[in-house]
Amino acid sequence: MDITPFVENLRRDLLAAAESAGEEARRTAERLGYALDPSARLALMEAISQAAAEITAAMPSGGVDVRLDGRDLDFVVHAPQAAPPAPPPPPAPPAAGDVVEEGLARITVRMPESVKNRADDLAAAAGQSLNTWLVNLVRSATSDRAIHVDVDLSNVPFGGDFPFGKRGNRRVTGWL
């Protein structure tokens, strides 16, 4: 879905409203129209994503995903299958100290395209949507039981085939 026509309509309506106020107002409205382009696009994308989430919530099974493809939006509809596959194993029950989420928060994450593609591949391999995969990853990293590992290996003598020694970086960081 190309949202450019909607942004152009907004810009044209802004110019039309400013026409009656004179040339200076029209030039100001024209500059504002171009300055607001990214915000208008983001607002439209968020509204469309929220609509897809509400449609998915109202569906008895299946769902609708909105994916960003350059400056365009693509919709992916997951229709129910005739014979559903075996359900995945149930998630581990929350520990006594875990809080069960009641609401959802929307965030925007900007990442290199190569990282996003790799995350898409890993999510698909796990049989999950990218959103579900990222939520589970963040949930694991922010759990009270999570252990953050930060090991400095710079003083450990490794041979020439040590993978972290080629660029002088001998620090290993991550979550367990």
Image (cartoon, rainbow, N blue to C red):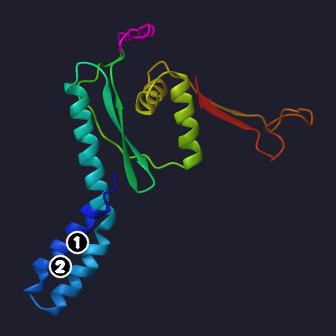
Q: Which residues are magenta?
A: 82-97
Residue at the image position 26 percent from the left and 45 percent from the top = 48
Instruction: Give percent across and percent down for residue 49.
Output: 29, 42
Instruction: Give percent across and percent down for residue 154.
Output: 80, 39
* Above or below, 132 relative to 92: below
Decide if residue 159 is on the left or right side of residue 109. right
Q: Which residue carries the number 1 mark? A: 11
Whether residue 109 is in magenta: the answer is: no
Give the Cα distance between marks 2 and 1: 6 Å
Q: Residue 71's quadrant in the figure?
A: bottom left
Q: Nearer the viewer, residue 122 or 105?
A: 122
Q: Please report contact status of discs 2 and 1: CB closer than 8 Å, yes or no.
A: yes
Q: Which mark is residue 53?
A: none
Q: Nearer the viewer, residue 13 or 105?
A: 13
What amino acid is found at the position of numbered circle 2 in the picture? Leu
Instruction: Give percent across and percent down for residue 19.
Output: 12, 85
| Residue found farthest to the right | 159
| Residue found farthest to the bottom | 23
Instruction: Give percent across and percent down for residue 82.
Output: 35, 12
Q: Quadrant of the C terminus?
A: top right
Q: Which residue carries the number 2 mark? A: 15
Magenta: main secondary structure:
loop
* Above or below, 32 relative to 75: below
Q: Residues within 10 Å of mark 2 (few under 14, many from 20)?
A: many
